[in-house]
Amino acid sequence: MGTGRNPIYNAIGRVRARGNDLKTMHLTVKIKSALHLIPALVAWGALMPSTAGAQTPKKVYTLFTGNDISVDMAKGLFPVRDVNGSSWVVVINGQEQVVSGAVGPINLKITPSIKLTESSATVSGFKREPSYTFANDPAVKLTKNLSSAASVSASYQAASNQANAVDPLTVTSASASGSGTTVAANVMGQNTAGDISQSAAAGVAASLDLQGKQEAVGYDAMTVEFEIASAKPIPAPYIVTMTRFHPRGSVPGTIQSLVFAKALDPIDAKASKVKFSEEGFPFDYEVVDFQMHLYNAGIEIPTNLLEKREEMTPDQAFDYIKKTYLEAHKSDTMHATPVMAELPSDLGGLVASGKYAETVYVKVSKDGLADEAFSDIGCTTKIEDPYLDSLVKCIRFKPALTHGVPVEGVALLNFSKMRI
């Protein structure tokens, strides 16, 4: 998306509520060109399994280049958390707030970043084609023009019929006297009808000619359709497309952007069909770049459409996290913190019943691993619970740092506060 000069593009965004067409709103999009590596790549609670079963299968993680989208407001920069109708949803002071484009332009900041997640979605049958808006659709125009021409023709025909109608009294009187009045009247009516018929034909021809000229204007929309599925349910998904295009007739090298967002129905393992039309393009635009990104509650989920993506095992993902963590804190002193886990899926039910609700403490090695739980921060009183020990061994930590050097440390764990 970025170009190296941190350009600011004027764009038109169109968002749509689930199942509803909405109005277009204008957006100013600020796109940073440099990739921003996030040290805390994955919120560890987000990696907890939600499916039933005694043990969760080994996860497959995906490293990918995504986009962070924020709304730039007077109060600051606020990350987008959802799409609602013709508005973006952000969180301000812990509360969701709807930002509508109905009252004026919205400034969006789009920042490319490298992300790591265990969730992913598969897109199949993807098609992206130029299309027409309803008002510019040649078929719609042809129907309207033919209807208009038919109406004009009918009016002319009515006038022609009126011109051909001769007063019977006049005909009878003229015939009785041998006058040529009747013949002259009929000739006049026939000529008038002929003129009107020619005018009707000319009107139809003019309409069709106008149709041809209007059809030549070109496409001014884009139709996108595909099927999407995910092994892990995605309850509140929405997509954001970002199209960079060259407007017809503009100076060579001129690039504009259009941002489009659409809320989707929940996604699960069964492929669901998605089809929508993006409007707001100028006539006969030329696409330079197109990207489609999938989100759930503000968290981006990679799809197979992304070019820069790499699948990793848990060990590979953890090594990557530690590497980027150390690079980001070369001289910092940090506490050990949990970052990812492969926990048994029955933990959720146990926590819901009240077990393992207290905070426990674990000794974390400089490699980011732990194997025992303690009831005190000094790690002097071990908790004798084999199941708890198995949980601790499933968790991986960002190790404690002293001036950027990994050291042994102590981490706090509270399973009741995790998103399991």
Image (spheres, grey):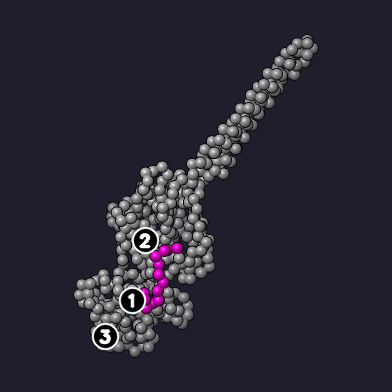
The residue wearing badge 3 is 379
Relative side of 270 to 347, left or right: right
Q: Secondary structure at mark 1?
A: helix
Which comes sooner in the sequence, label 2 or label 1? 2
Hey, what amino acid is under mark 3?
Cys
Note whether 17 is above or below 371 in the view shown. above
Q: Is residue 109 visible?
A: no
Hey, what amino acid is under mark 1?
Asp
| Alpha carbon distance from label 2 to label 3 | 41 Å
Picture coordinates of residue 261, whole percent (x, y): 43, 56
Q: Nearer the viewer, residue 96 or 73?
A: 73
Q: Nearer the viewer, residue 134 or 61?
A: 61
Q: Residue lying furthest right in this view? A: 176
Q: Secondary structure at mark 3?
A: loop
User: Callout 2: few (<14), some (14-19), or many (20+) C-alpha neighbours within 10 Å?
Assistant: many
In the rendered view of the protein, which quadrant contains the N terminus? bottom left
**Rendering quarter of residue 300:** bottom left
Picture coordinates of residue 18, whole percent (x, y): 48, 57
Q: Secondary structure at mark 2?
A: strand
Magenta-tinted stretch = 305-317
Q: Residue at x 49, y 41 (%)?
A: 217
